[in-house]
Amino acid sequence: MNGQTLQILIAMVVYMAVVVIIGVLFAKKANKSSENYFLGGRSLGPWVTAMSAEASDMSGWLLMGLPGVAYWCGLADAAWTAIGLAIGTYFNWLIVSKRLRRYSIRANNSITLPEFFSNRFRENKKVIMTLAAVFILVFFTVYAASCFVTCGKLFSTLFGLPYVSMMIIGAIFVLLYTALGGFLAESASDFMQGIVMIVALAVIVIISTASAGGFAAVIENARAIPGFLDFFGLATPSLDAEGVQIVEAGKPVFGAAAEYGWLSIFSMLAWGLGYFGMPQVLLRFMAIRKEEELKRSRRIAMIWVVISLAVAVFIGIVGRQLYPTVHLTSSAAESIFITLATSSLPPILAGFVMAGILAATISSSDSYLLIAASAFAKNIYQGVCRKNATDKQVMTMSRITLLVIALIAMFIAMDENSVIFNIVSFAWAGFGATFGPIMLFSLFWKRTNRPGAIAGMVGGAGMVFLWKLVISKLGGVFAIYELLPAFIFSSICIVAVSLMTAPPAKEIEEDFEFVRK
C-alpha cells in the first residue's frame, strides 16, 4: 500500500469511527423500547427528518449508479430518471407525509409500515401485516445487496484488493453498526451523511469541470458524441463480443444515436411513483416529532434532492471527457466518481470524498436492514407467531434477523459485475408497486377495504416479477420499466376488489374521517 492509498484509508477510517461513535451514543436510548429502536420515539426534528429520509433513500447509486448511467450512454436515461425522482419526492412530502403521520398515531400508534396497514383496516387475522412484512424482507434484501456491491466496488477500486473480501468487510461494518444503535443512530448518522454526500458531489463536480477546461468544454465534448447530450436520443457505445467498448486511436467508439421516445421517457419518469411505497422514507414521516414541521422538512429535502441529482448526472458527463477510455463496461462505468475523486484531489481529501460514497451506502443499507428486521421481529414474530413476546425478545429477534438478511444479501452481491443501477431499479419497482398504491388509497379513499388492500399488494408485487422476468422480454412497448404497469395493475386490483366486496366497518370509516378532518 503506497502513501497515497494510506492517506485515503486513514481519512475513511476516521469517518467510519465517527459513525460508530454515533451508534454508541444512541445505543442506550435506542434499547429502552422497541418503539425507540424502530421509530426513535417519534422524536426527529425537521432537519434530521428531511436529510435522513433523502440520504437513506438515495444510497450509493446516487454517487456511483447515476453517474455511471450518464457516463455510459449520456444524458437521457439519467436525466429523465432524476426528473422523475424529484417530482416523486415533492408530491410524497406534499400529500402523504402529514396524513400518514396523523394516521399512524390514530391506527393504534403504529411504529412499522406493516403494522400501520394492519391497524388501518383493524384486522384480527394478521394477513396484511404478514404479507407486508414478507415483501419488505424480499425487496430490502435485494436493496441491501446493491449497497454491499457498492462497498465492494469502492474498496476494491481504491485498494486493489479482491472484490468479494472488500464487499464482506463493508457488509459486516454496516451490520454491526445497525444492530448497535437502531433507528435513532441511523437517522442521526444519515443527517451527517446527507451533508457529506452533497459536499462530496459539489467538490468533485467543481474541480473536475475546471480540470476539463470549464463548463463550455465539457458540453462541447459531450455534443461530439452522437446522442450523448440529447433528451430525446441515447448514445450507444460500440461493444466487442465480450461487452467491452471498442477503442480506436485512443478514443472510445460510439454507434449512431438511438431513438429515445415517449415510452422511454414515461418509463424513467415512473421512478417517481416509487416514493409512495418506500418504507425508509415513509417511516421518517411517521417519526417526526410534530406534524407542523413537515413543511420545513419538505423544503429542505427538495433542495437537497434537486442539487444532488443534477450534480450526479453532470459528474458522469464530465467524467466521459476526462477519462473516456478508463471504464469500458457498463459495470465499470459506475466507478467514474471514484476515478475523478482520486485523480483530482490530494489523497487525504480524496479519502473524505470517498467517505461520501461510504456515507451513501451506510445511510441506505442500515435503513434497509433495520426496516426488514423490524418487519419480521415486530410484525411476524410478535404480531403473528408469539404475541406475548417482550420488547427484549423482539429486539433480540430483530438482531438475529439482521444477520440472516445480511448473509443473504452478501450472497446476492457476490458477482462483482453486478450493475448497481439495475439492482436498485428492481427493488425500487417492488416497493413502489407493492406499497405505493395501497398507501395512497388507504390515506385518501374511504371505500378501500381489507380485501382490496390484500389484492393490491399481492397484485403489485406479482406484476413486478411477471413483467420483469417474462413480459419485458417481448420488447417494444413491453420493455417499459416494470414499476409503471405494476403500479397501475395494483391500483386496479384495489379499486375492483374493494367495490366487489363489503364496505369497511363503521369504526374504520370513523378513523378515516377523523384523520381527514
Image (spheres, rainbow, N blue to C red):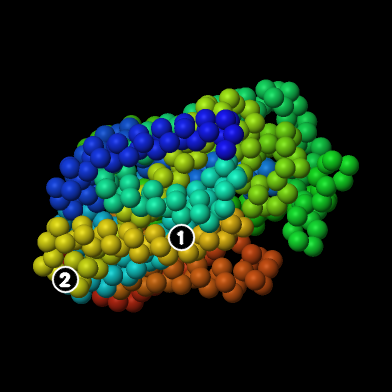
Pointer 2 local density, CA inside 10 Å: few below 14, some 14–19, many at least 20 = some
Q: What residue is disc 1 on?
A: 410
For the residue marked with disc 2, what is the amino acid? Answer: Arg
Residue 221: x and y in percent read: 78, 33
**Above or below — where is 236 with respect to 405?**
above
**Above or below — where is 414 with respect to 214?**
below
The residue under the point 75% across, 40% down is: 324
For the residue marked with disc 1, what is the amino acid? Answer: Met
Residue 277: x and y in percent read: 39, 56
The residue under the point 44% across, 61% down is: 409
Alpha-carbon distance for marks 2 and 1? 29 Å
Q: What residue is disc 2 on?
A: 386
Of marks 2 and 1, the one in the foreground: 1
Occupied quadrant, residue 185: top left
The residue under the point 73% across, 30% down is: 218
In the image shown, does 413 or 72 lie closer to the viewer? Answer: 413
Q: Which numbered marker is on residue 143?
A: none
Under tag 2, what secondary structure? Answer: loop
Under tag 1, what secondary structure? Answer: helix
Residue 277 in sight in this render:
yes
Residue 399: x and y in percent read: 27, 58
Q: Earlier in the sequence, mark 2 or mark 1?
A: 2
Residue 152: x and y in percent read: 53, 51
Residue 194 in sight in this render:
no
**Relative to 506, is 213 on the left or the right?**
right
In the image shown, does 244 or 302 lie closer to the viewer? Answer: 244
In the image shown, does 482 or 207 lie closer to the viewer? Answer: 207
Are the residues tagged 2 and 1 within 8 Å (C-beta)?
Answer: no
